[in-house]
């Protein structure tokens, strides 16, 4: 799967890709992640990507023209392999989805991550400043997505959250594929009509002693060896966390 991130800060997240699951997925060629500098698609000497909003107001708005040119370059293969638009299959049979990251978008969740994992390519447009020209939403993006009800300085962190959530669903990305079977927020792990958090987990030592002499114990059922009772306890704990 391929991810293309359009941003004015193409180096802001590269260090994160050098560690953990994403680094392994890239090394194993399960995913490919490209950063595209939006300033490369400007026409003035200052490489301007934003301007004052029509009608007045505070801050600056990201312009539609550089974003449009970046998308067109990707589609034409000049900034990477050619892609299709609006979720349809392109010339090479691949499917892509163009996503605008915005606080005004639909809230990202595990169900959406699973839907996105069915595509061959995600193009993520990272907003900055006071927002993005509305014509990007209306004419370029297939979907507008938010990661939560709060405001960030830009779309780069949301982009990386979406990339990790989707990439780990790709076959071979996780060391143990069974990890996906009982994950937090997995809509199908227990009941297709409900969403459950993962159950509490414990490991050694069985009883941990603090500096003040308090003992933090592991629930007895987990060390009982009684698998049916352990399963029952875990399912009960899942329900308690919803």
Image: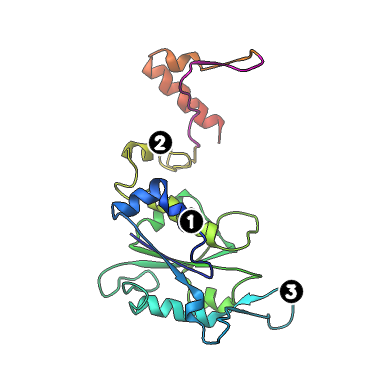
The local crowd at label 1, few if under 14, some if 14 to 19, many if 20 or more residues have their Cα within 10 Å, is: some
At a point 42% along the width and 35% down the height, the residue shown is 190
Prevailing SS of the magenta stretch? loop
Outermost bottom residue: 44
Q: Secondary structure at mark 3?
A: loop
| Whether residue 113 is visible | no
Percent from the top left, x then y, of residue 74? 38, 75
Question: Which dot, 2 or 3, sits closer to the camera?
Answer: 3
As drawn, 223 above or below 71:
above
Is 57 displayed left or right of 148 in the figure? right
Q: CA distance from mark 2 to mark 1?
A: 23 Å
Q: How many labels sit on residues?
A: 3
- Name which quarter of the figure residue 33 lies in: bottom left
Residue 182: assigned label:
2
Quadrant occupied by the N terminus: bottom left
Q: In the rendered view, tell whether residue 131 sits above or below residue 146.
A: below
Q: Is residue 202 magenta?
A: yes
Residue 153 visible in the shown view: yes
Q: Which is more toward the observer, 34 or 146? A: 34
Secondary structure under the numbered disc 1 in the rendered image? helix
> Which of pointers 2 and 1 lies earlier in the amino acid sequence?
1
Label ID, residue 160: 1
Residue with the mark numbered 3: 58
Q: Residue at x 48, y 18 (%)?
A: 205
Give the x, y percent position of residue 22. Answer: 39, 51
């Amino acid at each position: 799967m391929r991810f293309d991130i359009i941003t004015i800060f193409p180096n802001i997240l590269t260090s994160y890709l050098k560690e953990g699951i994403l680094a392994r997925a890239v090394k194993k060629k399960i995913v490919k992640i490209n950063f595209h500098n939006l300033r490369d698609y400007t026409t003035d000497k200052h490489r301007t990507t934003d301007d004052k909003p029509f009608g007045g107001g505070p801050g600056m708005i990201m312009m539609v023209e550089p974003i449009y040119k970046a998308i067109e370059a990707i589609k034409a293969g000049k900034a990477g392999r050619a892609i299709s638009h609006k979720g349809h299959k392109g010339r090479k049979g691949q499917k892509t989805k163009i996503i605008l990251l915005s606080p005004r978008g639909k809230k990202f969740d595990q169900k959406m991550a699973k839907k996105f994992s069915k595509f061959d390519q995600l193009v993520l447009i990272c907003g900055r400043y006071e927002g993005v020209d509305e014509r990007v939403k209306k004419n370029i993006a297939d979907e507008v997505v938010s990661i939560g009800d709060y405001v960030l300085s830009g779309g780069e962190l949301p982009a990386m959250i979406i990339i990790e959530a989707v990439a780990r669903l790709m076959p071979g990305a996780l060391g143990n594929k069974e990890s996906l079977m009982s994950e937090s927020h997995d809509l199908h792990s227990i009941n297709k009509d409900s969403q459950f958090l993962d159950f509490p987990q414990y490991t050694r030592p069985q009883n941990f002693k603090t500096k003040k002499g308090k003992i933090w114990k592991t629930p007895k059922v987990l060390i009982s060896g009684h698998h049916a009772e352990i399963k029952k306890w875990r399912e009960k704990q899942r329900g308690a966390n919803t």
